[in-house]
Amino acid sequence: MSRILVAHPSPDLYGSDWQLVETIHGLIEAGHRVNAALPLDGPLVPVLREAGAHVAVLPFTVLRKALMSPRGLAGLSLRSGPEIARLRALIRASGADLVLSNTVTIPWWPVAARAAGVPVLAHVHEAEDTQHRIIRTGLNAPLLAADRIVANSGAARRALLGVQPSLAGRTIVVHNGVAGPPRPPAPLRARGPEDPFRIAMVGRLSPRKGVDVALEAVALLRHQGVDASLTVCGSIFPGYEWYEAELRERAGAADLAGHVALAGYVRPTWPVLEEADAVVVPSRAEPFGNTAVEAMHAARPLVASRVQGLAEVVADEATGLLVEPESPAALAGALGRLARDPQAAADLAERGAIEAAERFSTAGYRATMAGIVADLLRR
Ligand SMILES: CC(=O)N[C@H]1[C@@H](OP(=O)(O)OP(=O)(O)OC[C@H]2O[C@@H](n3ccc(=O)[nH]c3=O)[C@H](O)[C@@H]2O)O[C@H](CO)[C@@H](O)[C@@H]1O
Ligand SMILES: O=P([O-])([O-])O[C@@H]1[C@@H](O)[C@H](O)[C@@H](O)[C@H](O)[C@@H]1O
């Protein structure tokens, strides 16, 4: 039994948070003792305790990627000394045999663990490729202190190596394992080509998730005579209040009013997916996309953007449909096909469910992560 200290930036229950829960299950099943450090209390805390981790809430720096500037990054590094010293002392005092630093937004954990002489595994959930190169280089620089890096997709690995090529030898891809529903999903509702067509989307209300694109696609479908409606599960991250206000205003316009529900954070999302005739993941960028796998587990036909990890998760025309990102017309085109051809939609959904069980099982993921940790501990 080894002691693993896990650091994670948020106490929420979105993608990287649930992925951490799976990782911790894998470590505990392998016989390790897990301590988790979070900067804030929140809904993730009881979930981690339930999984068997000991949780401590303590202050440390969490980066906001969208707010980074080269000057901001430089200032941050200049002020980092005392925090790195504090975290190094904490890591030593905890007796950790290994530190797992989850996401690239907690830069001083890998650095402090290396300073403490403890092996570091970094888990990268991000695949930033639009910000200025200087920012991306700085954001990923703390990973130079990691012994091993797990990227959640080939796209995330490429984005990282694009700015830190020297990490190639230590960075491996492990696709996420994503939990399915607790019991088999209700069969896809039988519908005729003219019947109402209910679409679901799950994700943060954030421009990168393309919620606005989904709304415009529904407006186009309705304009074309498809009786489409949309339910969106998800809330904003602080700072994106303006985006939610824009979405609510758009959803209230004459062509959409009464046909779009912005439901806020929903847990679990299985009932919403079960109610749906199709699920969309219209992200502008998506390092992996757990919500796409969840749609497949729920055996609902899926339309996703052809970007980054989503293009690794979905086999176009076989387990879902991939469409050009940021194009309401392309999204509406694919959804219209599913609405008009319920049999084709059902076939996609069935193949998606088989694929999700085969490629993205939590059992396989947990074992892979535990194997990577065992390998690092043996060194
Ligand atoms: C921009 C970015 O970096 N995205 C990645 C990030 O988190 P990100 O939070 O973007 O993750 P995903 O969209 O993949 O997953 C969101 C999760 O939150 C849940 N949910 C969401 C809304 C809601 O109302 N209720 C609810 O339960 C979903 O069911 C899902 O399990 O890490 C994930 C895990 O590696 C990756 O798959 C994402 O590609
Ligand atoms: O505002 P920002 O820091 O670029 O980005 C945020 C991330 O840091 C956070 O982890 C994620 O959950 C939010 O949806 C948002 O994407």
Image (cartoon, helix red, strand yellow):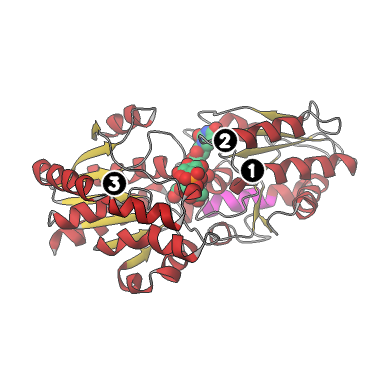
Q: Which mark, residue 185?
A: 2
Residues under labels 1 and 3: Cα distance? 28 Å
Residue linked to disc 1: 300
Q: Are marks 1 and 2 in contact (CB under 8 Å)?
A: yes
The percent coordinates of residue 166 (x first, y second) are: 33, 74
Report the residue at 31% width, 35% height from top: 39
The 10 Å Cα crowd at callout 2, few under 14, some 14 to 19, many 20 or more, is: some
Number of the label disc, if any, that sits on residue 204: none
From the image, tell me which residue sits under label 3. Answer: 26
The type of residue carrying mark 2 is: Pro
Q: CA distance from mark 2 to mark 3?
A: 25 Å
For marks 1 and 3, the one nearer the N-term is 3
Q: Position of residue 197 (x, y in %)?
A: 78, 37
Say which of marks 2 and 3 sits in front. 3
Inspect the magenta stretch and tell me whether residue 107 lies in it.
no
Indicate whether 166 appears above or below 258. below
Task: Point out residue 324 in the picture as x, y percentages from the top left corner.
Answer: 70, 59
Asked if the residue at tag 3 contacts the one at tag 1, i.e. Cβ–Cβ closer than 8 Å, the answer is no
